[in-house]
């Protein structure tokens, strides 16, 4: 199951995991978009289905998990990708806005992870990958609620890894940097794009395929001894710090 699977990074991960041979359930509040992704995968020779999922609603989370087991026989992999973005100064953000971001980005990851783990632990195996952000690793202006939510995802990932590891379930996180998605093309200004490009040692935005490749690795047998890890896929921004042109 991939939450947030109707578009952007989530859709790219759905298609990559299907190419890896997994049967994929694309789950998203955008039910039409999720169904479209599933049809695309099937047209490419994969196995997939789409379903509606609001990750803030426990009843919908349980229904989606049950559907995955019903359609495909088991739930072996969860990629928690559903999220909301935000750019607003800390002094201006309202409590309503704060709660809305945390409800999707953090509580939604918890609800989905808990429900998926409940189905993986009895089998003694499973893969959970949570999509965090470099905003959860660094203090980025304007990322108050978003950064706090993604920092929470990173800590939640580590706790889940510690608790679920003895049951054969690995839990890791991916912290994307600037990625070329339909959303960033619409939201990022020319100045924003220039700043991110200058900050990245690789000098560019990441691609959807590059994010999907990282998820593919963490879901694979090659990552069987990797858990509790946060994989920054950010062109080097997180580790390099600010760069200066000399």
Image: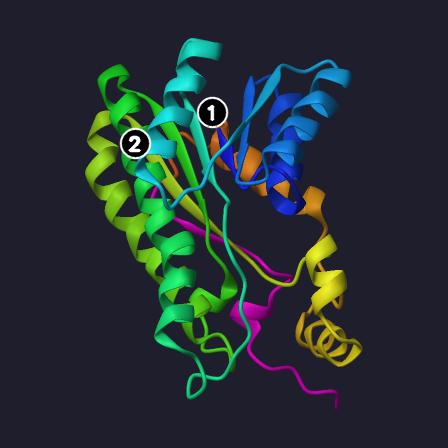
Q: Residue at x 43, y 48 (%)?
A: 173
Compared with 41, 31 (above or below) is below
Q: Which residue: 67% across, 57% down? A: 179
- Total labels: the figure holds 2
Residue 187, x across and y down, in percent:
70, 67
- For the residues carrying marks 2 and 1, which lies nearer the camera in this image? 2
Residue 16 x %, y %: 65, 30
Query: Up-down: is 141 above or below 215?
Result: below
> Between disc 2 and disc 1, whose residue precedes?
2
Checking the image for residue 44, the label placed there is none
Which span is picked out in magenta? 227-246
Q: Is residue 67 visible?
A: yes
SS assignment for the magenta stretch, majority: loop
Task: Check disc 2 and report the residue beneath it.
Answer: 115
- Residue depicted at x 59% and y 41%: 10
Vertical position of residue 8 compared to residue 99: above or below:
above
Q: Position of residue 48 (x, y in %)?
A: 61, 18
Q: Quadrant of the C terminus?
A: bottom right
Please give the name of the residue rendered at 69% of the width and 46% of the height, measured from the top-left corner: 208
The residue lying toward the viewer, choosing from 24 and 233, is: 24
- Please tell me whether residue 5 belongs to the stretch shown in magenta: no
Mark 1 neighbour density, 10 Å: few (under 14) some (14–19) many (20 or more): few
Q: In 3D space, how far apart are the residues under numbered discs 2 and 1 (Cα atoms)?
A: 22 Å
Question: What x and y, as percent, mark residue 21?
Answer: 60, 17
Depth order, front residue of 213/58:
58
Q: Which residue is mark 1?
A: 221
Q: Residue 146: which quarter of the image?
A: bottom left
């Amino acid at each position: 199951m991939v939450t947030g699977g109707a578009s952007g990074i989530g859709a790219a991960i759905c298609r990559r995991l299907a190419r890896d041979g997994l049967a994929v359930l694309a789950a998203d509040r955008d039910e039409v978009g999720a169904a479209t992704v599933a049809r695309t995968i099937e047209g490419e020779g994969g196995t997939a289905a789409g379903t509606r999922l609001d990750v803030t609603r426990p009843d919908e989370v349980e229904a989606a998990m049950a559907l995955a087991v019903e359609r495909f026989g088991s739930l072996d992999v969860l990629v928690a990708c559903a999220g909301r973005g935000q750019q607003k100064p800390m002094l201006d953000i309202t409590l309503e806005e704060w709660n809305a971001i945390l409800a999707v980005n953090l509580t939604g990851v918890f609800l989905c992870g808990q429900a998926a783990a409940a189905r993986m632990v009895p089998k003694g195996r499973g893969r959970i990958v949570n999509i965090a952000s470099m905003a959860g690793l660094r203090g980025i202006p304007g990322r108050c609620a978003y950064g706090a939510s993604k920092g929470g995802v990173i800590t939640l990932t580590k706790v889940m890894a510690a608790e679920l590891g003895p049951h054969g379930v690995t839990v890791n996180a991916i912290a994307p940097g600037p990625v070329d998605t339909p959303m960033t093309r619409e939201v990022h200004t020319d100045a924003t794009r220039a700043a991110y490009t200058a900050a990245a040692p690789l000098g560019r935005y990441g691609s959807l395929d590059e994010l999907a490749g990282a998820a593919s690795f963490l879901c694979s047998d090659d990552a069987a001894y990797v858990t509790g890890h946060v994989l920054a896929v950010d062109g080097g921004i997180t580790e390099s710090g600010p760069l200066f042109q000399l």
